[in-house]
Amino acid sequence: MHKYNRVFNFIAVIIFIVFFWVVAIFLMFSLSSSKDPLKNLLPNDVEVVISVNTDQLIKSFLVDALYRSEFSANELKLLEKGRNSQEVQSFGIEVNSELVMFYDLWNKIPIQGFLFNISNEKDFNGLRLKSKNDIKRSNGKQGVILLISDNATEEMIAYFTEFADNIISKKVKHMEYGSKPEMFSLDYKGNQNTYITDLKLNAKIDEERILLKGSGKKNDALSFSVKDYNMLTEPSTTKYLEFQSGQLPDSLYQYFEFVLEEIGIEIPKITSQQMLLYGLSIENIRGSTTVLPKFDWILRFDSIIDLDSQLVSINTSTDMMKIIDKKSIKIGETLYYYSQISSHEIYIGVTESPKIKSIKTQVLPLLKGNPSVLLEIEGKGLIAQLINVMPQVKNTRVFMENIEYFNIHTSDDNGANLKIDGEIRLKEGKMMTIELARFLLMFMK
């Protein structure tokens, strides 16, 4: 009987493969590729807009799946399971056209939204949203959803209700003849602290790579001159992610500000920085779970900083850290070293003697290295162990470990503009669309 079961399973897989081919060929010739750009419906001052052309993405996946890669029998079963799952029903949303995600601020309160074409207005109207304040609007052809927190004020709800109504009341402008929407696009307004404003970034998938191209304007309030800067020239480990920028956004800076606050150092405004990130350590300190970054970090400031004069006021009253000497402290099990390397620059990090060299250069945004270090999570406690075995962490780590090359950088475009180029490349023989599909399938096991 076991022998026949194997035969039947083999036949079932063959039937599914044939069915997959038929559906794929049908989709290749039937999916629309001429939808109007939805993001034109949004106001011009929306902070962040991300557009995904799922039509191109699906077609690219089908070509790679049929001609350039193979799914295992188990993965094919998961594809079939996903196809039949109630969780992936369209709810009246046209999933084979443009999908738009956007982010904005109202009185410093963030708002997230989604915009898409509608295939069935009745199904869309029947879609239930999670929060009682979430907003859903449709004009029969396009639909918009705004995610609003449960504690939102009546004023905020009224504002974004009108915001949604204004979006769907507009008519989509037709694309110019011959134009073709990008597979992915991002529009970012920026602010007074960002090196680049009015950023427009496009991305496409080319076999094993994601290629990024973009441009933006220089922030007139910041300096782009070539100067002598102290730079970290060599990481302490082979796996690292290098980050270079101006002032960090508040939402990101708060994770690193904790270390500086515990040391007791008050610092001026940051003008630029370079960071080599190696991983994260999760510590249980005074019964509280604390995430400590493992990095080497050079900070540059808009005014002179005298680190030695501040060392005498280092906070010795807290039991969250242990002072080793006047150049190092220990927070939990993580040891940090710090030193002043120029009148406007300081170093803090996990390397006792980092390789630092003065280099004449222009500091522009840069992100390169190995992104998997973001999930290099250490810690002896139960929380760290639980995080490491979570499917979201394990599956993402598997995908990231297939990344062979990661480099997104900015260059001066000789004038008021900056140019962005990037490449994310998987290991040889790995197709980007296939690995992204496998990544999603891992959450269905």
Image (tube, rainbow, N blue to C red):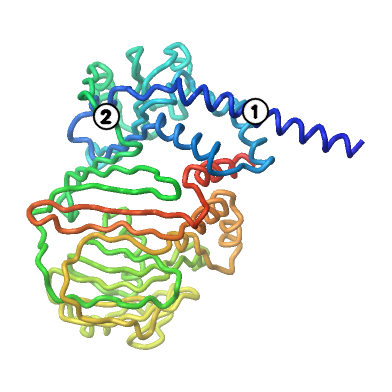
x and y percent of residue 287 in the render? 52, 64
* Residue carrying label 2: 39
x and y percent of residue 44 in the render? 18, 32
Above or below residue 387? Residue 351 is below
The tally of labels here is 2
Q: Give the side of residue 84 with respect to residue 317, left or right.
A: right
For the residues labelled 2 and 1, the Cα–Cα distance comes to: 38 Å
Q: Give the side of residue 274 with respect to residue 330, left or right.
A: left
x and y percent of residue 177 in the render? 22, 23
- The kind of residue on which mark 1 rests is Val
Above or below residue 269? Residue 39 is above
Between 71 and 134, the one lying in front of the other is 71
* Residue carrying label 1: 18
x and y percent of residue 420 in the render? 24, 52
Quadrant that contains the N terminus: top right
Between 58 and 222, the one lying in front of the other is 58
Quadrant that contains the C terminus: top right
User: Residue placed at 89% from the left, 39% from the top?
Assistant: 2
